[in-house]
Structure formats: C-alpha cells, structure tokens
Amino acid sequence: MQDGRDMEEEQTVRELSHDEFDPNGTLALIAVYFVILLAMWVFMYFVEFLGNELTVVG
Amino acid sequence: MGSALETGTPSFVDRFPQEASVVKAALTSSFIALFLGAVFGLIQGLHRTDVFRFLDSQYYYTVLTAHGVLMVVSFTIFFLVGIFTWAVVRSLDRPVEDIRYTWAWYGLMVVGTLMAVVAILGGFVPSTELSADVLYTFYAPLQAHPLFYGGLAIFIIGTWLAGADWFRSWYAWKQEHPDERIPLQTFMVLTTMLMWYIATIGIAIAVVGFLLPWSLGLIESVNPLLTRTLFWFWGHPVVYFWLMPAYLLWYTVLPSISGGRLFSDPLARVVFVLFLLLSTPVGIHHQYVDPGIAEGFKLIAMTNTMFLLLPSLLTAFTVVASMEHGARQRGGSGLFGWLRALPWRNPAFTGMALAGLMFAAGGFSGMINAGMNINYLIHNTLWVPGHFHLTVGTAVALTFMAASYWLWPQLTNKPLFSRPIALTQTVVWFVGMALMSNAMHVMGLFGVPRRTAEPQYEGFEFVASFGSITELRMQLALGATLLFISTVLFVSNIALSTGSPTRTGLGQPLSKPLSPAADSPEVLDNLKLWFGIAMVLVVLAYMLPLASIVGDSGVIDRGVSAAPVMIDLLTGLNPVTAVTEAVSRLSVAIVGVVP
Amino acid sequence: MNIHSYEKIWLVVAILLIVGFISTVTYGATAVGIDMVDDEGGTVNASALDEDPRFSEPRVEQVGDNEYEAYVIAQQYIFNPDPIRVPANSTVTFFITSPDVIHGFEIVGTNANTMVIPGQVAKITVNFNDPGEYGIVCHEYCGSGHHTMEGSVVVQPEDEFEPGGDE
C-alpha cells in the first residue's frame, strides 16, 4: 500500500528549473476556461436575466 | 525507538509530538462535525425532495440549522486551526511557545461548539425551551436560546486566541531570524488571521453587543437591518476563512504531491495580501436586494467583490502551472497530454485536483451572485446553495479530506487504512456534488427558493423550461445520497487507520518553490502596512452604510419585537417517536429484502 | 519580481474580465434601466402598521394613468393582500414591509425579488403586460411554518379590474 505510493511519487524523470519551464498547457487550459466564463456570462446576463419577464425598473 | 532503525523522512509526529496531538484533536473534532453534518444533510436532501421523510416539516429547520452550523462553523474552522497549527510549526520548524495555551484555545472552541450544538439539538425536544432554529445566519428578530449566541461567542474567542498563538510563534522565530523572509506557510496563516480579526469585529458586535443581551432580556429589541448587516460584514470574509486553508494546501502541498514545485512564491504572497485587503469590504453583496441600503453602497460592494475575483483567478494559473511542472518532471508532454502524467491514483492528488475543478465551476456561479442586478434572478433561490456546495462544499471540503489522506499518516505514524477506498471516496464526492449542485443551480433558475421544507406550493407550480422539476428533485436526492456515502467512506477510512501498524519514515517533505520568496519585494512581508490598508478599506466601505442604517432606524428599533422560534406542539410529530418509527419501518423493509 | 510572461498575460486578461463584468452590470443599470431596491421606501414602525397611512389597509390603488401602488404586508405566514390584483399593461410599485420577522418576496420565476425587513419598506416597480397569474413565495426562512407562506399576483384584463383591498 505504502510502497505503491512511494513508487508512484518517485517517478521524476527530469528536473525542470524556472527558466526551462513554460506552462504552455496551463495557458491553454486557462484560455479555455476564459472562453467558457465569457460565453456563460453573456448567456446568463443577456438571455436568462434580461430575457426574463418582470424586471424591476424603479 | 532507536534512530538507527528509522528509514525515510521523520514525520511531523516524530519531530513535534505535542503539537501533533493538538492537530489530531482539532482534525478529529472537525471530522465528527463533518459526519454529523452529513447525517443532517442527508435527512434534509431526502426530506425537501419528498423522497423519504420521517419528521414533520417544522423540524426541517432544526435539521438545516444543525447542518449549516456543523459544516461551515465546526467542520471547516476546526480543520483550519489544525492545519494552521501544523503549517506554522512545520514552516517555522519550532514547537509552539506554550502547549498548555494551545490546548486552552482548542478547549474553548470545543466548549463553544458544544453549547451551540446543544441549543440547536434542543429544537428536536419540544418540551424544553431550548431551541435555536434560526439557521446559520440567525437573522433577528428570530431569536435563539442564549446558549446558542454564547457558544458562538466563546468559539470565536477561541479562534482569536489561536491566531495569537501563531503570531507568538512567528514573533519568537523572528527574534532568532531577523533578516529572513517569513516562511510561505506562516505568511499565509498570518495574513488569513489578520483578515479574520477584521472580519470578526462585525459578528462580535452583533452577537455580544446585541443578540446575546437581547436573548437574555437585557435589551428589548434590536434593529434587524443593522444586525443583518453586521452579520454579512463577517459573513463574506468567513467564506475566505474557509477557503484559505484550502489555498494554503493547493499552494504548498499540491505541487509536491504532483511531483513538482510551486511555480511562484511571490505571486502566492500577493494573492494572500489581496485577500486580506478585499475579503471584508464586500459583505453588502449579500444584501443587494435589501431595503434600507442605498444603491451606491451596493455598487461599491460589487466593485470590490469583482476585484476579489483577481486573487482567485491568479491562483488558478499558479496552481495549475505547478501541477503542470510536476507532470512534465514526471515525463508528461504535449499541450494537454501532460494531464495524463499526473498521479491520478493518489487520492490526495485526485481529491485536490477535483476540488479545484469544481471550484472553477463554483467561481462562475459566484460571478453571477456578485453581479448586482443579475442577483434579482437568483437571490435566495436554490442556485445559491448550489453555488456554495461547489465552493465550501467541495473546493474546501474535498481538499480537506484529500489533504487528510496525506497528512493523517504523518500525525500518527500509521499508514492510511485503504488507498483504493480513499480514491473511490473522492470520485464519489465529485459525482455526487456534480449531480446535486447541478440540480440546485437549475432549479434556482426556475425560481425554486432555498431554505424551505417543501418541494412544492399549493397555489402555483414551478415551471421548468427544460427537463422537469421532478427529475431535478430526484437528481438532487441522488447527489445528496452519494455525498453521504462518500462522507461515511472518508470518516471510516480515517477511523480504521488507527488500527494500522505503526511505521517510521512516513514524513512527506515539501518541495521548494521555483521562484523563491527572495524574488519578491520585501514590502510584501510588511504585515502592519497591509493590515492598516485593509482597515481603511473596511472603514470606507462600511462607515456610511452603517451610519445611514442607524440614522434611519436607530441602533435599536423599538418597533421590532423578538420572535423566539416556537414549535407547534399540537401538529408536531414528536421527533423521538418519528425516529423510532422510521428505524423500525426501515428495518422491516431491510428484513423483507434479505432472504 | 520574477513573474513569468504568461502570468502577466493572464493578469491583464483577468482584469479585463472583471472590468467587463462591472461594465455589463452598469449597462443593465443605465441603458436597460434596472433599479436596485434601496432606502427610497423609507422606514416604518413595525409594531404599529395598523396606524400607518401606507400599511393600515393593505391594498392596490391607482395613482395615475396605468400607474398603481400596491401596499403589501408579509407576515408569518401569509401575504396580505392575497391575491394582489393588478390590471394588465400597467406599472405597479410595490411597497412591502413586515410586522414580525424578515421575509422574502419573490414573484416566482421572474426578476421581481426583494427582502422584506421589519422596520424597513422595500419598494420595487414592475411593468405588467399580459393578463395572467403569478405565484409569490417567501424565500427567507421565517419560522416553523415558512414553507406554507405563499401568495399570488393576478394580472386582470384592464376592463375587469377594480382597484382596492382584498375581497
């Protein structure tokens, strides 16, 4: 059980320093997240909210 | 044991046995609260969806109060004081200054919790006057028994003393290391506690200044809008109080578990400073649709709230980048292919990663909550509990459980009872919450209110624009059941670990950040400066609204009388009978199924 | 400070996102004209609503061409008047208060949604177009009978409508 974890966690095959590492995958993931956020916001605000009946105008 | 026999890294309990006992005690209290909270959560989930109910609906609110208080006050904050004690002792590498003092604040927190819980559970016994069916928000003029407010006050004082303990450790450490940067974990603990000291001013005034004397009959009435505003003065920063230990774990433990290093220590410090500055002057966003507060104050609260997204968005980048660093060191490659190289079979990793993923979704629904006028769409609907079950209910809770799988062996020198069960538990939580929270969000959009015992009303029907309300109710109930099963798996796994054989060398060292603290300007460590600015921001955000509330309706509104929460004895089904009946019905059903 | 260029990009994008959110809400408040409940409704003595000119008689009254005011009391566990009758194609300003504890007032499935706090008067103005019926639900826990607290708004054809109180 414990040995399984030790093996799994010692799989480092290379050391990457700050200058050798560009988080390209992170940038891609976060760009996808950004697009989802933006699209969902527009949908929620303009369709779900402004498209809903009875708006408080005063 | 002889040191010659030891292999591997010494664990926390090897190095600091006395502190490990306190941390274990705090975590144990937290897990007991989690288990009880989950029992109430299940009762509630099945009751309001009308899947299975054995209590009269008026007791639903006793169940709901117990669920709320046990989960977001006891479970989260006991875990916090445990993990913060661990983090300060570990990162300063020194024992606490006086272990008796440490036990004293822990004891106070336990006493406070017991008082509040007794008052709440009194609600199930109609023959006593003891009752606190006021829900987690205890909005006056609903009135609880003084024991409830007293317990809450003692609990909070306990957390204040805990903070003083950590500051004391840091101060002692600083005398010996005058030119060093504050270690990252200690920095996170101290900034979080400064935020907490500011935030608790609100609840201290509300509880000690108004609600406790009022429940004792010393003052006749209170101003409900004032106590409500003071509640939310504390009520929003407290969500960051729940979240900061999770952030601490994501920043300082998750990178190591992923096989990598924290991407940037300086940015982590910036994030915690931003939380200190912006967590408190935002509480009015819970009151967007309150009468008696001018729109301008609501707009200011919204602007601050939206900027409070910034530290979380920055965290998303830094934490994911640290995981990516681990994956690439483990041989991962490709734009998304590195995700496969992460240690998905490690429950501590998978739990935290899934928690982070759900936080991304919860972040979105939080952005909707924060939008001043779009709040009309979802205010006090099921959308809101849908949101916070993703944030505190998963980002925080699942991270805490995952971290326990990593930390508990280091506190006890006993390996976890079962890693496969632990892994299953984290996935079951994720699936259960996905179902329950999705159903809640969608039902909220159809106008289904939160905090109500009944799924439907007599005079009208909720209209679903897609799917059906019944389907969504079943989804909610299924999710709640899975979450309960997941909690049982977690608690029993930890409990069974006490039976594991004692081993040495269970310590898990933490990796150093890629970009160290030395890269950041020293001003980041100037806690007095940030505390001062945070105070100024709070005064700016709250002085005028509070003055205008007091100016309009007084410190005390004499027109408002107390409404002690009363159970109607005639229609109420006695809970004791109800539980016995339900148990016997269930056992008959089970006996019927078993051949 | 050693910050990776990707982090700088994300910082800028995140700030733009935040500014975008604030701008959308401002657009809704100005161009669309969505108004927040605020302190305009004033305060009231919660224990003497029967002596208050606005709330002694919960009712709907006409105040102009197609303009109406509805004075509503939310209390444990009813809304008064119930139903609230209003004419189609009208602008109705609701004034809502409570004599006992905090309640909620949500016209179900719509954006008309406010808290009701004893001592304070919530004021919201809403336009009703077609005839029909809406449910009202109390969405803040207000005591052991909270789940029974509901009401309704009946939007009547203009020619059938008579202003006044309940019944």
Image: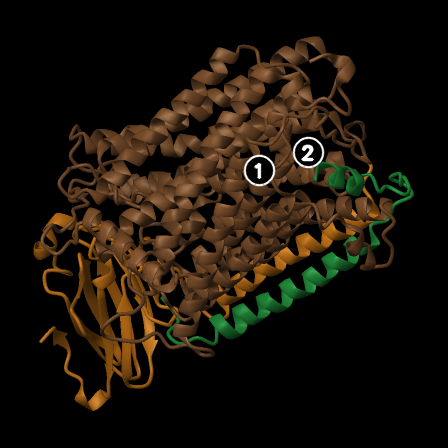
Chain colours: A green, B brown, C orange
Subunit that carries the residue with mark 2: B
**Above/below status of B193 relative to B341:** above
Residue at 34% from the left image edge and 59% from the top image edge: B591
Q: Secondary structure at mark 1?
A: helix
Residue B146, x across and y down, in percent: 23, 31
1 vs 2, front mark: 1
The answer to which of B120 and B271 lies nearer the viewer is: B120
Q: Which mark is residue B244?
A: 1
Answer yes or no: is residue B194 visible.
Answer: no
Q: Quadrant of the N terminus of chain B?
A: top right
Q: Secondary structure at mark 2?
A: helix
Q: Which mark is residue B269?
A: 2
Crowding at label 1, few (<14), some or many (≥20) Cα neighbours within 10 Å? many
Residue at 48% from the left image edge and 44% from the top image edge: B282
Amino acid type at mark 1 = Met
Q: Which is nearer the N-term, disc 1 or disc 2?
A: 1
Q: Which mark is residue B256?
A: none
Amino acid type at mark 2 = Arg
Crowding at label 2, few (<14), some or many (≥20) Cα neighbours within 10 Å? many
Residue B435, x across and y down, in percent: 51, 63
| Residue B10 occupies quadrant | top right
Residue at 76% from the left image edge and 46% from the top image edge: B323
The answer to which of B481 and B283 lies nearer the viewer is: B481
Q: Quadrant of the C terminus of chain B?
A: bottom left
Subunit that carries the residue with mark 1: B
